[in-house]
Structures are given as structure tokens and as C-alpha cells.
Amino acid sequence: MSCGVALAVSLLLSDPTVAAAAARPPAAADAPVSVAGEPLFADIVARSGVLRGEVQAWMAAGAADRPDFFAGPDFAGFRARAAELAALDMQGHLVLKARGVDGDLKCILRGIAEDIPVKLGAVEAASSPAERRVALDELHYLLDDNVEVITAPPQPEV
């Protein structure tokens, strides 16, 4: 085999990202670990994503503008699933608290657990389609935040 062919083969088989990853220093033993892959937190992310999608669909279709929207089975089922999500968020908070984690995620999960019923109440209490749209938008943002805070890479404490 000629030197040119050997060089070409070695260049084809080399991956610069492997060399870059190998050059990084090892993670510190006390570096924060992501919980996103744990079953409880993955369930929270999945449920929140589904509920967020429903809210987005309602906003796009103007479904919540109908006077009978809150009396229908769609909203009743949504409300029940949102209450389950709030309970899971609080459970996530308690798990992190029991582990002795002193970070933002623990506090954020508790805040989301407490805010979900408040945001649902604001949607139901809205007296006009415009107010309801704002309340739905805030609920959508909260559900999006629920996904983002769990899936974001953990940051070291400051």
C-alpha cells in the first residue's frame, strides 16, 4: 500500500470530534448531574409537552373562545392531567430536596407545581376571549418552562 493511500484511509477513518472530546478534561466528581433521564423527570417532560401542545392547538384554533369550552370533556380532561402534572412537579421537588440538592431546579419545580392551578384558574376566570388568550399564553409559557428547566444542562452552583 502506498503512503498516499494509507494517509487517505487514516484521514477517512479519523473523526475530529473524537479527538476534541478526548482533549477535554474529565468532569469534576461534584459536577451537577442532569435528572432529565430519570423516569420521574422524563415523565414530567413528556406530560408537560403534551399539555403544552393542547394549549397551543386551542390557541391556534380559537377553541377556548367558544362559550361552552369549559363545560366540555376536553378541558375537564386537561384540567385533571394538569393537576397530575402539578403533583409530579411537587414530587420532583421533594425528591431533589431529599437528595440535598440546593439548586434552582428544586425551587422551580415547586413554583411550577404551585402555579399550574393558578394559571388554570386564570384561564377559567377570563371574562373575554382576549383575556382568555393571554391566560392561555401564560399557561403555555409555564408548561414550556417545565420542559426547558428539566432538559437544560445542569449548571454548577455559584
Image: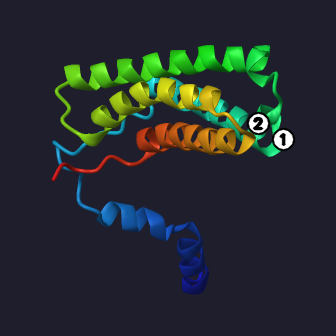
Where 118 falls versus 7 (above or below)? above
Where 149 falls versus 124 (above or below)? below
Tell whether 25 sits left or right of 125. left
The residue nearer to you, when weighing 37 against 147, is 147
Q: Residue at x 59, y 71 (%)?
A: 12
In the rendered image, residue 63, in percent from the top left (x then y), is placed at 81, 34
In the rendered image, residue 36, in percent from the top left (x then y), is placed at 43, 35
Report crowding for label 2: few under 14, some 14 to 19, many 20 or more residues within 10 A (C-alpha).
Answer: some
| Quadrant of res 57 | top right
Q: Is residue 103 visible?
A: yes
Q: Residue at x 58, y 86 (%)?
A: 4
Residue 137 marker = none
- The quarter of the rendered structure image containing the N terminus is bottom right
Tell whether 61 sits left or right of 27. right
Q: Residue at x 76, y 15 (%)?
A: 71
For badge 1, the amino acid type reads Ala
Residue 61 marker = 1
Q: Residue furthest front?
A: 127
**Does dot 1 land on a helix, a strand or a loop?**
helix
Q: Residue at x 15, y 53 (%)?
A: 158
Q: Are marks 1 and 2 in contact (CB under 8 Å)?
A: yes
Question: Disc 1 and disc 2: Cα gap in Å?
Answer: 5 Å
Task: Give the color scheme: rainbow, by chain, secondary structure or one colour.
Answer: rainbow
Q: Is residue 38 visible?
A: no
Where 118 falls versus 25 (above or below)? above
In the rendered image, residue 24, in percent from the top left (x then y), is placed at 29, 63
In the rendered image, residue 152, in percent from the top left (x then y), is placed at 42, 47
Residue picked out by circle 2: 58
